[in-house]
Amino acid sequence: MNHFTKGIIDSIVELLYPNKCISCDKVLLKIEKEIGFCKNCAKKIKLVGPHYCLKCGVPVNNNEEYCKSCNSTSNFFIQNKAIFRYTGEMKNAMYRFKYANRRCYGKVFVYHAIKNYGSWIKEKGFDVIVPVPMYDKKEKKRGYNQAKVFADALSEVTNIPVADGIVGRNVDTVAMKQLNRLKRTKNLLKAFTILKNDVQFRKVLIVDDIYTTGSTLNEVARVLKDGGVKEVYGLCICIGQL
């Protein structure tokens, strides 16, 4: 671990909150606060691991470089990274983060993001972080955009500014939990728009909560590239199995 990554991780530990496990709400021991999970939940949490698609970040078999989807389709983003697999205890944590006002979880996720991808983030030299936008009415009803919360927490420890006024969401798309990749792509057509005609950033990191088929990330990346961005990457908290 290099000094850049270690320094960021140490600063996050000092700021870490909450004091309860983000999955089960058990009060954390001092030694557990660093990771945000109690001992029992930590055993069940699954990181993406060393074998993942070099394009989208989905877990793959040991001998595979790319998943089937990325082997057969092209994307507007160059690469996506994800921290956790979207299973079990992480589903509990993400539900609370999104719907129960547990915005403090953002710092826990950033701790793990830096621990796993701190060197990658530094190496890429991103100009800005762009959170996937929510539809205005939905964000007002919920009170916050979880992707923006994650982006702000990441910005605090990397000093990469957040630019949440570049891309807007035009429509409130239907829930996509049960939709396949093709239907998700159709559902997202014209869902996003560029809010600035000439974006003066060369390299952008899009952040979101959950990567399922990649349709959302890809559509935001397309809009950004249409607006003038040269390189687009992604970082998501969780990723599903395609």
Image: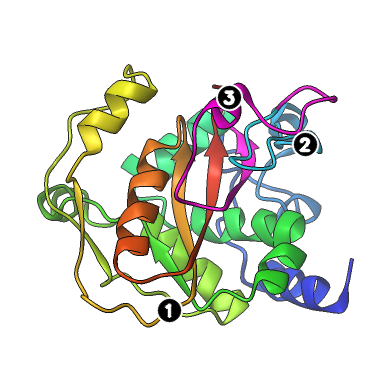
In magenta segment, residue 62: yes
Q: Secondary structure at mark 2?
A: loop
Which residue has dot 2 on it?
Answer: 49
* Front disc: 2 or 1: 1
- Mark 1 sits on what residue? 201
Nearer-the-camera pick, 47 or 225: 225
What is the CA distance from the residue labelled 1 to the residue labelled 3? Answer: 35 Å
Nearer to us of marks 1 and 3 is 1
Q: Is residue 93 left or right of residue 112?
A: left
Extreme residue toward the right, this view: 1
User: Is 126 displayed left or right of 177 in the figure?
Assistant: right
Foreground of the two, 1 or 191: 191
Quick one: label 1 or label 3, which is nearer the N terminus? Answer: 3
Q: Which residue is mark 3?
A: 87
Q: Quadrant of the N terminus?
A: bottom right
Between 32 and 174, the one lying in front of the other is 174
- Report how far apart the C-alphas of labels 2 and 1 lie in the structure: 31 Å
Q: CA distance from mark 3 to mark 2?
A: 14 Å
